[in-house]
Amino acid sequence: MDIKFRDTLLSFDQVKLNMMNSDIEVLFNGEEKMLSNAFFEYVLVPQNGEKKTFVSAAAFKYDGKPLSGFMDVFGTDKIKVMVHHYSYIKEPHAQAHITGGFTQHRLMKESNIYLHDGSKLVLIKRKKDVQDFFRSKKSAVDRYFKEVNPDIKNPKQLLNLVQAMTA
């Protein structure tokens, strides 16, 4: 796996992405070292013959709150599709011991899809969110939805829609 620092691209045998605090752990000279997200720009992860780009989510804010975890970046144009992978600790419900359910704290893994235009992140949960993002091209987006019927939960299909709207 390759890690892009400010001026250098270095390759490491093993890299772990910490989804709680956006840091990475690398195996260097037989020792595990932790790198803060301030020291690297992105991580390239080979998967199925192609390289996926992961950027620290700490560099982004949504609704004024900084994000944690990592962003899987799709596309190289001005508008990018970004899948936010993060984890958090879910506390048990106050009445769990009475009503049944989990009584232990659980580590939860989540993913959200965003569109990023260079300045703002827009959370995409349904087709209306895409229509609102491309407000000036509403008729073209509606036509694309009718002709292709993309699954907006699939980042590659969402990227195809973005590329069609920006072409």
Image: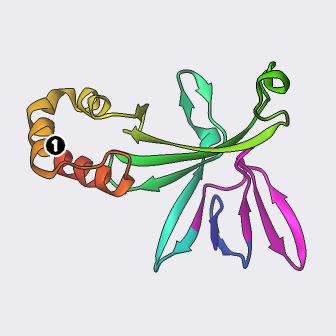
Which residue: 26% across, 47% down? 162
Q: Quadrant of residue 99?
A: top right
Which residue: 16% across, 43% down? 145
- Queried whether the magenta region covers residue 115, the answer comes back as no
Residue 130 in percent (x, y) is at 28, 34
**Which residue type does callout 1 highlight?**
Phe
In the image, the segment drawn in magenta is 15-44
Residue 167 in percent (x, y) is at 15, 51
Task: Farthest residue to the front: give it.
Answer: 99
Q: Does residue 153 appear left or right of residue 157 in this picture?
A: right
Q: Quadrant of residue 135?
A: top left
Residue 48 in percent (x, y) is at 47, 77
> What residue is pinned by disc 1?
145
Which residue: 50% across, 65% down? 52
Q: Which quadrant is the N terminus positioned in?
A: bottom right
Q: Secondary structure at mark 1?
A: helix
Q: Does residue 41 appear left or right of residue 77 in this picture?
A: right
From the viewer's perspective, is residue 141 above or below residue 15?
Answer: above
* Residue 41 visible in image: yes
Q: Does residue 140 appear left or right of residue 116 in this picture?
A: left
Residue 100 in percent (x, y) is at 77, 29
Dot 1 surroundings within 10 Å: few (below 14), some, or many (20 or more)? Answer: some
